[in-house]
Amino acid sequence: MARSTARKRALNTLYEADEKGQDILSLLAERIAEPGAQTPLPDYAIDIVRGVAEHRRDIDRTLNDHSTGWKVWRMPVVDRNILRIAVWEILFNEEVPDKVAIDEALSLSKTLCDDDSPAFIHGLLSAICADADQRASETADDSSDDHADESADDPSAPASASEPATDADPSDETAGDGGATDGESE
């Protein structure tokens, strides 16, 4: 079954739990045990629902941090659950490219939400992606800095490009200072 269909089925489950005020995982267990008139939930729909349930606090915090004027609890039920699915895919599912998560959320919102929702959803998800990309870049920079620090502590590590290697005798007082002696400046 296509992932688009799985997202729609996951949205149905999240929407139902939200509307009923029911625990997401207990409703999921019911839907898995007794799918009713529908076909059984696709595996990816189950992964989405479990992922959203597991990370809902982080997802909602992220949405609140990036949304101006609309906290999660004020958003229409369908909108907030489309956003929860997309944010889960962006932040917690490395198999789905961010652009795909946004496109799929927009597709759902264009068919299920009011006319203003797609623009709101697109803007919010784009801001979240930009922030996630920036954090990933900073993390990569930090880990390369950590590696540089480790090699600086290791005398057997090769010199970096910013530290020219020298074959000068450390006991030679004139090495590396341009021949200047005490009291002289360059």
Image (spheres, rainbow, N blue to C red):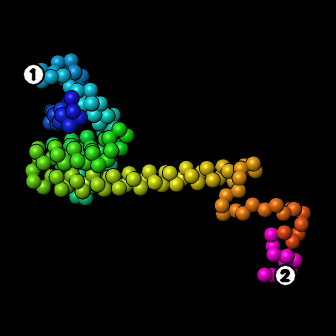
| Left or right: where 77 falls relative to 48 | left
- Mark drawn on residue 150: none
Q: Residue at x 36, y 44 (%)?
A: 91
Q: Earlier in the sequence, mark 1 or mark 2?
A: 1
Which amino acid, by three-letter code, is at mark 2?
A: Glu
Q: Quadrant of the C terminus?
A: bottom right
**Tag 2 secondary structure:** loop
Residue 177 is covered by the magenta coloring: yes
Question: In the image, residue 17 lies at what x, y percent?
Answer: 19, 32
Splitting the image into 4 quarters, where does residue 51 fall? Answer: top left
**Tag 1 secondary structure:** loop
Question: In the image, residue 21 lies at what x, y percent?
Answer: 18, 34
Question: In the image, residue 14 lies at what x, y percent?
Answer: 20, 35
| Residue 21 can be seen, yes or no | no
Q: Magenta region: which residues?
A: 176-186
Foreground of the two, 121 or 56 = 121
